[in-house]
Amino acid sequence: MPLENTFLWNEIHQQPDVLRALLESERETVAHLVDSIRARDIRHVVIAARGTSDNAGRYAKYLFGAANRLVVSLATPSLFTIYGQPPDLRDALVLGISQSGASPDLVAVLAEGRAQGALTAAITNFSDSELATQADHVIALHARPEQSLAATKTYTSELAAVALLSSTLSGDEDRLHALSAIPAAVGATLAACTPIDRVAERYRYMRHCVVIGRGYNYATAFELALKLKELTYTIAEPYSSADFLHGPVALIDRGFPVIVIAPQGQMTPRLRELTATVAGHGAEVVAISDDEDILNQAQVTLRLPAPLPEWLSPITAVVPGQVFAMFLAHTRGIDVDNPRSLHKVTHTE
């Protein structure tokens, strides 16, 4: 099947429209949730998520912490479902993030939060899901059915929902205005992805790599590594640039692929240093960036054409990674819509 006829291709290219629909449709819902957060003077957020949505939770940890000064933790669902020893959630916002809203362990976290009297909210593509029924407020993703097994448009819409919630809670009009640039920026990024099919051919036989980001794009490193694992069966390990230098840098020898995710921002100097270090060890650097110094140190460049504020950059920075993973899978003869051993809805406890 031609790649352009797959669900994955089409869902990746639907992202600008999905983002536009979410940002236009969910402002009132988010405003009501913000009113509840303020009324309860909530300072702690517990996020329940799995898989791709867990990476959206990593982004939320940085954004809610930096922009809203909230303490954010990722839930440990087995404490709720297996050990039966849930923590005290009474003063928290318990936020479930899930494409399907169907995983029992995530539902259990929100149900326990509700039973304890916590404020609960869900970000999901299905407003009638079990997760949504446990939420006081439901932010819909507006992604329409996602039929490819690999989540793409639901991931970027989850990030946008988190960004909309954070910006509304901050009351910062500049941040709210900045959100309006997201759909066009993602569209421009997709338009710049045309050469990636040739890049994928270069890595047909790649079996191991590391993916490095930091700050807001720590989440992007995890998400791109996940896409490489599930779509191409590559052993892709995600790291922050700081953690990577505390030991895993020993992995690097000549030709070892290192994917560096480095949109311009406060982390740029540190990522320049990291790129120089791994290049000095002989790594083959693939740079997803708009920083000339980093791009000049890379053997392969996936240029980000549409700069966004650093706090929004994960929404565009992940897109070349999605396209790269898709082309690499196709180059290897893998059905990009149905990678082995995966199900669209995974039920865990």
Image (tube, rainbow, N blue to C red):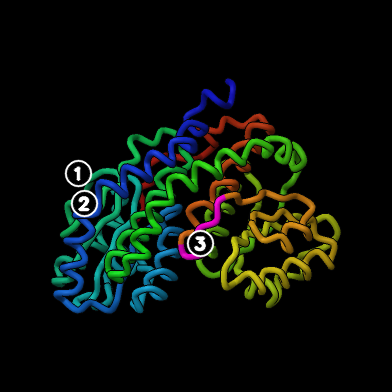
Residue 230 visible, this orientation: no
Is residue 3 placed above or below 324 in the rendered structure? Answer: above
| Left/right of residue 138 with respect to residue 195 in the rendered view | left
Residue wearing tag 1: 128
The answer to whether residue 308 is magenta is: yes
Q: Residue at x 55, y 56 (%)?
A: 307
| Left/right of residue 307 with respect to residue 29 in the rendered view | right
Q: Residue at x 66, y 73 (%)?
A: 269
Q: Magenta-highlighted stretch: main secondary structure?
A: loop
Q: Position of residue 123 (x, y in %)?
A: 29, 54
What is the magenta range? 306-311
Q: Dividing the image into 4 quarters, which one contains the N terminus? A: top right
Residue wearing tag 2: 132
Q: Position of residue 146 (x, y in %)?
A: 39, 36
Q: Position of residue 335 (x, y in %)?
A: 57, 30
- The residues tagged by marks 1 and 3 sit, at their Cα atoms, a distance apart of 28 Å
Residue wearing tag 3: 219
Q: Residue at x 44, y 64 (%)?
A: 59
